[in-house]
Image (cartoon, rainbow, N blue to C red):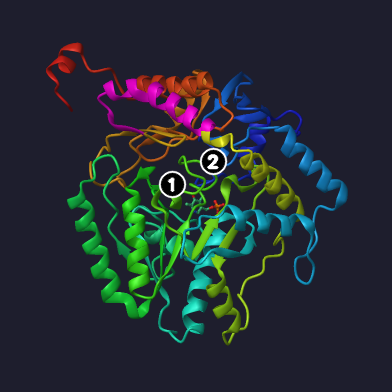
Amino acid sequence: MSSTQRSLIQRDRASLWHPYAPASGDLPLWEVEAADGVRLRLRDDDGGRHQVLDAMSSWWSVIHGYRNPFLDAAAKRQIDAFSHVMFGGLTHGPAVELAERLVSMAPSAEGRPRLERVFLADSGSISVEVALKLAVQFQTAAGRPKRQRFLSLRGGYHGDTFAAMGVCDPVDGMHSAFPGLLAANVFAPRPPAAATATAEDIGQWRAEVEVLAARHSDELAAIIAEPVLQGAGGMFAYPAECVRILREIADRHGLLLILDEIATGFGRTGELFAASHAGVVPDIMCVGKALTGGYLTLAAMLCTREVAGTVSRGAAGALLHGPTFMGNPLACAVANASLGILDGGAWRADVARVGAALEAGLAPARELDAVADVRTIGAVGVIELHCPNEGDPNEGDAVDVAAVTRAAVAHGVWVRPFRNLVYAMPPYISTAAEAGAMAAGMVAAVAEVHGVARSAATLAAGVRP
Ligand SMILES: *Cc1c(COP(=O)(O)O)cnc(C)c1O
């Protein structure tokens, strides 16, 4: 059959991999024919067309919507100048402007060294690799060469490359697939949930982390964590106080604090950076995902002058990393446009509006027996289902991903559930009505696939499943 006779989806199934997917092409797949604002036009296997609201922001990145005129113009301007030049020995306006913008918007606090030095990386995972390398090089240069491990939180997610996988949750992450290849890091318990944590829970958690840090301080280079919201590890919100505790423990034991803001950065949780909920400034910070408004792949690692200076004076004399496409001008130019929009400040009201619409729209999901929890933080809305095997989220997906995705598309919403979670991270430009429609579509899809509403009698009796 010639390629013109086969559908795009059939041709895809014959030759491509998709994320975390088998090569066999039996998972549902849609072709994107067009994307504009908060909407995607999809074509299914049978040629049927669906207009859907994108509740995923293309994996949390498209915060200003598709075909944003300001970002489009920035990209076109830079293409007409030059799209790429190497960054070894050369520099250019877009990279310098981006570094200055990131430094000026990074979290800061009285009496704490600022994040002043920027390493541009080509993806979030790579920025995490660079952060981990930097921490080890820092400790070596500071005369502590045995400090080569990391203290990480259970439930964390930091990317898919080897060092990044090594600091992801040891159970849910990919550790079991690569025994012997992932570094043996130290894992602290997941902090208590934000919604229910008591001072006692937080104190207990602090004591456990403190014991681990003290026991392993001779071999630890840094603590790494996603501040306030663990994303791909479970869309799990925890108290800002716990980020302050990590800062204190890091300081007490001579560890660097690496905050991974790749998912939380640029306003998603209601602060420009989630670290600011805690008033914490890390020694190293990673950003990515929404950095270019979802146009091009780009990430960055920021660190303090002290860390950068110590590594640069060390025996290696340099930070040992330098990707081919480092500082890609096109990506930097679009990132500058995206950060320029954020500078305008409307994101704060946008995130509040989207969050409120999600909260109201998702509330009815609480009436479903299959639902364990419904929560929102910033412009993130989560429906959490009961796990088939409660307490062991590895026992298969609680969500029928294919069925819920199909049902949501039928209701005009694009979602990509994982494990026991159906969640939304809409573009900031979503109106209250659009965010509400996303929530309604999610609730309808979960109800159709995962069960019926509790009976009025059960509700009246206050019986919980
Ligand atoms: C997505 C993500 C990463 C990895 O970023 P990629 O660009 O996919 O490599 C790392 N950390 C966090 C918190 C993320 O959400």
Label 2 crowd bin: few (<14), some (14–19), many (20+), radius 10 Å = some
Q: Which one is in front, 195 or 393?
A: 195
Residue 262 appears at what percent x and percent y?
52, 51
Q: Which one is in front, 248 or 196?
A: 248
Q: Which residue is mark 2?
A: 59
Tell which circle, 1 or 2, labels the residue nearer the N-terminal end. 2
Label 1 crowd bin: few (<14), some (14–19), many (20+), radius 10 Å = some
Residue 416 shows in this picture: yes
Point out the residue furthest to the top here.
456
Q: Which mark is residue 232?
A: 1
Indicate if the residue with disc 2 has its beta carbon within 8 Å of ligand 1: yes
Q: Which residues are magenta?
A: 349-375
Query: Does the segment drawn in magenta span residue 370?
Result: yes
Question: Where the N terminus falls, by quadrant?
Answer: top right
Question: Where the C terminus falls, by quadrant?
Answer: top left
Residue 126 appears at what percent x and percent y?
57, 61
Placement of 307 over or under 26, stated as above or below: below
